[in-house]
Amino acid sequence: MRVYESAEDYLEAILVIGQRRSVVRSIDIANELNFSKPSVSVAMKKLRESGHIEMDPDGFIHLLPSGREIAEHIYERHRTLTDFFVYLGVSEDVASADACKVEHDLSDETFEKIKSHVLRTMGAQAEN
C-alpha cells in the first residue's frame, strides 16, 4: 500500500511528539506541523481508517504497528539526512528543513549509501 508524503509526515510527527511527551493529541500535531486543527482531524480519520493509528476514549493518539514502522522509517531518514547535511556544513535548521524535503523521495539505494557514509564518518570522528 502506498503511503503518501503527508501521511508519512503525520506519522513521523506522532512518533516525535510521543518521544517528547507521554501522550499525543491532535492539537499537538497541529502545533508541531503548523497545520490547522480541521486538517489534522481529517488526516487522523484517514490514518485511523487505514489502520496506522488509534485514538483512545480520551482523544490520545497511538501508533499501531504499521504506523510505527512507517514513522520510524521516515524519522531515521530525517535524522540521517540532517546529520549528513550538517556534516557538509549546512546549518542545523536548514539541514533539517532540507531533510524533510528529501526524506520521502530518496531511493532506498541512495539512502543506504548516505547512511553508510554518515556512520563511517561519525564513527571516525568519535574515535579522534
Image (spheres, rainbow, N blue to C red):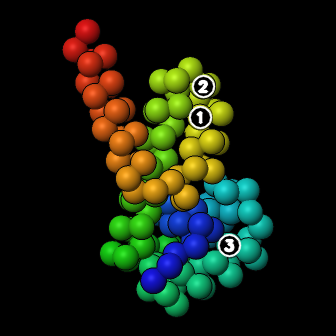
Numbered badge on residue 40? 3
Residue reaching furthest to the left:
127
Residue 34 on image: x %, y %: 73, 56
Tell me if residue 5 comes above or below residue 121 in the rendering. below
- Residue type at mark 2? Val
Residue 35 on image: x %, y %: 74, 63
The residue that mark 2 highlights is 90
Do residues under tags 2 and 3 come within 8 Å of each other at their CB atoms?
no
Residue reaching furthest to the bottom:
49
Do residues under tags 2 and 1 come within 8 Å of each other at their CB atoms?
yes
- Residue type at mark 1? Ala
Q: Nearer the viewer, residue 100 or 13?
A: 100
The residue that mark 1 highlights is 95
For mark 2, give the secondary structure.
Answer: loop
Residue 66 on image: x %, y %: 37, 76
- Quarter of the image where the N terminus is located: bottom left
For mark 1, give the secondary structure.
Answer: helix
The CA distance from mark 1 to mark 3 is 26 Å
Residue 122 on image: x %, y %: 32, 25
The CA distance from mark 2 to mark 1 is 6 Å
The CA distance from mark 2 to mark 3 is 31 Å
The answer, for residue 29, to whether it is visible in the render is yes
